[in-house]
Every structure is written in structure tokens, then in C-alpha cells.
Image (spheres, grey):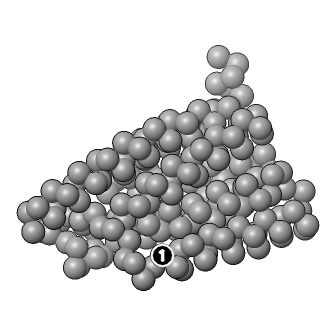
Amino acid sequence: MAYLAANWLEIIGLISGLLCVWLLIRENVLTFPLGLIYAVVTVVVVARANLFADVLLNLYYVVMNAYGWYFWIYGGRERRTSDTLLVAWVPKQHWLGIVAVIVLGTLLMGWYFATQTQASLPYPDSFTTVASFVAMWMSARKYLESWILWLIIDVIQVGLYIVKGIEAYALLYLIYLFMAVYGWFAWRRHLVAQNMAA
């Protein structure tokens, strides 16, 4: 009970984060307003732990949850059937840019936080931040490969949060890891069904 009282924000983040990912797997647009709540709470939690790259990440999540909410309702006309945005593969021409953003972004952000701040674990924290920028964009665009990137991020985040003593978020990302696997198979099944129906 004392843990709950001392870490109530982490618990809110854990619950809202789990619900958010569950709704994403189920392709439910309500994932995005719930994701807004999760992102705001997480900004506070990670700021207290001096994970500055994670603060930036969760501020970005606020914006991307609003964008995803809009895109899933109104965007992607070429992939839309009535009220549903269909799952798609990332277009081949986007891959070079995706890899470049992750590698260069990690190096630049990691260098900045390592040399200009008191940030903990600046390079792994920067990698998960930059990769999450990309994965969130991919999720907002409903690209299947977002789940692979989320899986990689989740493995690293579990380690970061254990090292920093943020146990509730370590547990959350461990669960996210399994949810990413489930999400991959669920979205892939829908993609195969879409292709067969086309």
C-alpha cells in the first residue's frame, strides 16, 4: 500500500499505457486519446528520474497521439474502406530515411545529453527515444513494421527502467514486449485478410 501511495503516477502510467497498447492492437481509435493521458503522466515520471530524452519522447507522443487520432479517422484515403484505415507495409522508399533518422538521431541526441547534461545512460536512452519517434509515426500511419521496432525498443526500455529503479515502468515495458509480438501477429493477420479480399 505504501508503494501505491508513493508511486501513484507510475501506476496511472502503467494502467493507461497497457490500455492504450491493447486498443492499438485491436485497431481501436480510442488508443489515441488514452495515449494522450499516458504521455502526459509519463513526462512527469521520467523527468523525476532525469531521463531527459524520455521527456522529449513523451512530449512528442502528445503530438503524435493527436496526429494518429486524426489520421485514423480522416487520413490515408488510398487505404480506407468506409470508416476503417487498413494496415499497410511501410513503403520501400521510406526505409532509408527511417534508418538514417534512427542512427543519426541517436548519435546526435546521445552526444548532446552525454556532454551537455547530467542525463543517465544517454545513448541507450537516446536510441529508445529516437526509435520511438519513428515507431510512433509508423503506428499513427498504421504500418505493420511498427510492431518490430516497438519490440526492440521495449527490450531496451526494460533494462533502462530496471537500472533507474522505476519498477512499475520496467514491468510495463516487459508487458509491452509481449504485446508487441501479439500486435504484430494481429495486424499481420488483418493485412493478409485484406489482401485476400482485394
| Residue found at the very far bottom of the displayed protein | 93
Residue 45 appearing in the image: yes
Residue 12: quarter of image:
top right
9 is higher (above) or lower (below) than 140: above
What residue is shown with label 1?
A: 95
Q: Residue at x 90, y 67 (%)?
A: 116
Q: Residue at x 57, y 66 (%)?
A: 133
Residue 9 appearing in the image: no
Residue 86's spot in the image, x, y percent? 23, 65
**Helix, strand or loop for disc 1:** helix
The type of residue carrying mark 1 is: Trp
Residue 14's spot in the image, x, y percent? 55, 37
- 10 Å neighbourhood of mark 1: few (<14), some, or many (≥20)? few
Residue 136's spot in the image, x, y percent? 49, 63
Q: Count how many numbered circles sit on residues in the image.
A: 1
140 is higher (above) or lower (below) than 163: below
Nearer to the camera, 30 or 170:
170
Classify residue 29 as left or right of residue 106: left
